[in-house]
């Protein structure tokens, strides 16, 4: 497994010092200086479309400044143009790379999954029955799908706009391209449900014999943190980062009113009832800067990386 690592698994130390009269109050302690050694859980970062592991140096630095000694691994797979490969292929590849890290972390690990990587991580969490992920931090990821005329779309499919991309995406050829696996055209809902080999299955929007098991696996996480914001400029609608999406009039329907939430098809409603669903919205952040914005880290991620 290739990965970009920072820091070691050195535990953090907390020291308590007592002296003078205060020390006399506790003679049974036997010593006035002692250390408690507690380690932070490893953090695994999964990148997004057209990224590579080297793009996350700032995020690694933020984590190790706040939580010294944290073992941080940015998985070095499906970089750059390879990130266009089918989502299930990426799930299996990332899963194989991540599983040994999980096995060596008896107390569990944390996920930070950016953009398309957030959907990869959902696939891993749904299909891996013995994962030990504590916090799943979804960083500006199109969790409810993507439908927008963005620079990415114009670069990838210059002959298409959002209104006609379904002609390509909802075909067997289109489903070999990652973005088409979660392209969610609200005007062609039936085609999406019947053609999407990835998102429609993850959301149990079409019949999935594994849905009960996948839900059970996903709900093993302790926290789901959904980060996004109105100035993202790529995730469309931006509320998709928090499971909101368009209806057929392109009006955004928030997560709490979405069918996948109301029917609790993979556990969103259960997580909310448990108090383990966290929404963090930050204005003024463009898509490519989420993982290098220190304010976002402190506001939305830092506290969920603590044991």
Image: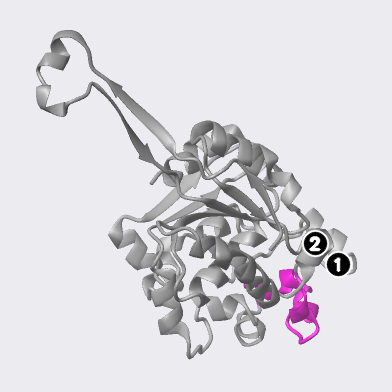
Residue 213 x/y as whole percent:
42, 82
- The reply to whether dot 2 and dot 1 touch (C-beta < 8 Å) is yes
- The answer to whether residue 265 of the structure is visible from this angle is no
Residue 211 x/y as whole percent:
45, 83
Q: Name the residue under label 1.
A: 157
Q: Does the magenta stretch include residue 77?
A: no
Residue drawn at 52 percent across, 81 percent down = 205
Residues 55 and 107: in front is 107
Q: What element carries label 1?
A: loop
Circle 1 packing at 10 Å, graded few (<14), some (14-19), many (20+), is few
Q: Does the magenta stretch include residue 174?
A: yes
Residue 230 x/y as whole percent:
59, 45
Q: Quadrant of the N terminus?
A: bottom right
Residue 111 in the figure: left or right of residue 135: right
Residue drawn at 81 percent across, 84 percent down = 173
Residue 172 in the figure: left or right of residue 239: right
Residues 111 and 186: in front is 111
Quadrant location of residue 14?
A: top left
Quadrant location of residue 130?
A: bottom left
Residue 202 x/y as whole percent:
54, 76
Residue drawn at 62 percent across, 78 percent down = 198
Q: What element carries label 2?
A: helix
Which circle marks residue 153 in the picture?
2
Which circle marks residue 301 in the picture?
none
Residues 152 and 120: in front is 120
The residue range painted magenta reads 163-187
């Amino acid at each position: 497994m290739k990965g970009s690592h920072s820091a070691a698994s050195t535990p953090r130390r907390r020291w308590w010092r007592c002296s003078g009269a205060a020390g006399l109050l506790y003679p049974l302690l036997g010593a006035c200086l002692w250390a408690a050694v507690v380690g932070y859980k490893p953090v695994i970062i999964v990148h997004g479309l057209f990224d590579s592991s080297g793009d996350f140096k700032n995020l690694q630095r933020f984590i190790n400044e706040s939580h010294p000694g944290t073992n941080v691994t940015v998985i070095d797979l499906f970089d750059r143009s390879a990130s266009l490969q089918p989502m299930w292929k990426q799930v299996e590849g990332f899963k194989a790379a991540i599983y040994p890290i999980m096995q060596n972390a008896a107390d569990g690990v944390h996920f930070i999954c950016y953009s398309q990587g957030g959907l990869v991580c959902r696939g891993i969490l749904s299909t891996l029955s013995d994962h030990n992920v504590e916090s799943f931090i979804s960083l500006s990821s199109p969790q409810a799908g993507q439908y927008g005329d963005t620079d990415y779309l114009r670069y990838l499919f210059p002959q298409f706009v959002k209104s006609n991309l379904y002609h390509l995406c909802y075909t067997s050829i289109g489903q070999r391209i990652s973005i088409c696996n979660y392209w969610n055209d609200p005007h062609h809902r039936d085609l999406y449900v019947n053609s999407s080999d990835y998102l429609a299955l993850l959301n149990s929007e079409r019949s999935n014999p594994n849905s009960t098991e996948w839900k059970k696996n996903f709900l093993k996480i302790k926290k789901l943190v959904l980060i996004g914001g109105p100035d993202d400029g790529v995730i469309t609608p931006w509320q998709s980062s928090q499971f909101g999406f368009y209806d057929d009039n392109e009006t955004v329907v928030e997560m709490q009113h979405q069918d996948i939430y109301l029917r609790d098809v993979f556990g969103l409603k259960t997580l909310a009832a448990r108090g383990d669903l966290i929404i963090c919205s930050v204005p003024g952040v463009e898509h490519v800067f989420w993982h290098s914005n220190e304010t976002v880290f402190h506001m939305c991620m830092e506290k969920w990386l603590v044991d």
